[in-house]
Image (spheres, helix red, strand yellow):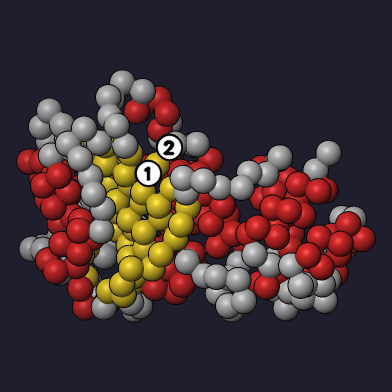
Amino acid sequence: MGEFKHKHSLGQNFLKDKKVLIKIIDSVDVKEDDLIIEVGPGQGALTKYLKLFHANLLCYEIDTRVEKYLNSFIDDKTKIIYKDFLSVDLENELKDIKYNDLYIIANLPYYITTPILEKIINTKLDVKAMVLMVQNEVALRLAAKPGSKDYGAISVYLNYYYDVERLFVVDRTSFDPIPKVDSAVIRLKKKEKRSLVKNEKFFFEFVRTAFTMKRKNLRNNLKKYNLEKIEEILHKYNLSLQDRAENVSLECFIDIVNNLSK
């Protein structure tokens, strides 16, 4: 990596393990008429492999110091945009690009993993799949199933839109500089068929409230809602208000919210 000084403030840990890079691109089936968005390409280790798909490639990088590494990738199908991904108007930036399916593939900075996921969901982009490198602890949370200690509001949000799978763990020595924790690669595939809520804003608010204090039961966390109606729905799933939110499945949350929504 030469004399490049990594910025801790940008969460810069560049992936250097070729085997991991190959496993990442092997986890998606991208065609030439598709579009890939890469967030935070850094010095282009993953970018080099993404170009093997010969698809449209849009890379967002906040650190202009890496221009000398990334600009060599630019061609008629690859654009490098030196902007903060969280601040861009994605719908506007994609409107002139012709593509079939959209993929997001990235080694995400740990400190903005959740904001990036929230931005993608809130933009309402039709993303076929995401393959993301995140902190292992976060990967466990994102892919968690009901009944596990890692299951939380973010697990429910993502599971509403995607099938989430933790593919493999990546040892910290695969990065330069070496971070203090291990990472993992997760894959989020768009659900072809999913149960819909009547009011998404209310759904997200309700789920967040249910998990407000993880050690408290549903009766305590959901006091401001119609507990009688909630109890009635919970019984259908062999649950009660004495249970915690971590035991409530996505289907049960949807059922409750749709019965509470007017």
Task: State the SS at label 2.
Answer: loop
Q: Quadrant of the N terminus?
A: bottom left
Q: Residue at x 12, y 66 (%)?
A: 18
Between 166 and 223, which is closer to the camera in this rendering?
166
Given the current orientation, which residue lies at the most extreme right position?
228
Q: Residue at x 43, y 37 (%)?
A: 126
Q: Residue at x 51, y 46 (%)?
A: 193
Task: State the SS at label 1.
Answer: strand
Is 192 situated left or right of 48 in this image? Answer: right
In terms of image quadrants, where is residue 234?
A: bottom right
Question: Badge 1 is on which residue?
Answer: 128
Identified by mark 2, the residue type is Asp
Say whether marks 2 and 1 touch (CB < 8 Å): yes
Q: Is residue 59 visible?
A: no
Density class for disc 1 (Cα within 10 Å; few <14, some 14-19, many ≥20) is some
Question: Badge 2 is on which residue?
Answer: 126
Residue 21, image x and y in percent? Answer: 18, 62
Density class for disc 2 (Cα within 10 Å; few <14, some 14-19, many ≥20) is few
Relative to residue 252, is residue 34 depicted above or below? above
Residue 191, image x and y in percent? Answer: 47, 49
Between 64 and 16, which is closer to the camera in this rendering?
16
In terms of image quadrants, where is residue 198?
A: top right
Is 171 situated left or right of 108 in this image? Answer: left
Mark 2 to mark 1: distance in Å? 6 Å
Q: Residue at x 20, y 40 (%)?
A: 31
Residue 112, image x and y in percent? Answer: 44, 56
Residue 69, image x and y in percent? Answer: 11, 48
Relative to residue 37, is residue 100 depicted above or below? above
Q: Is residue 252 visible?
A: yes
Q: Quadrant of the C terminus?
A: top right
Identified by mark 1, the residue type is Lys
Relative to residue 21, is residue 258 depicted above or below? above
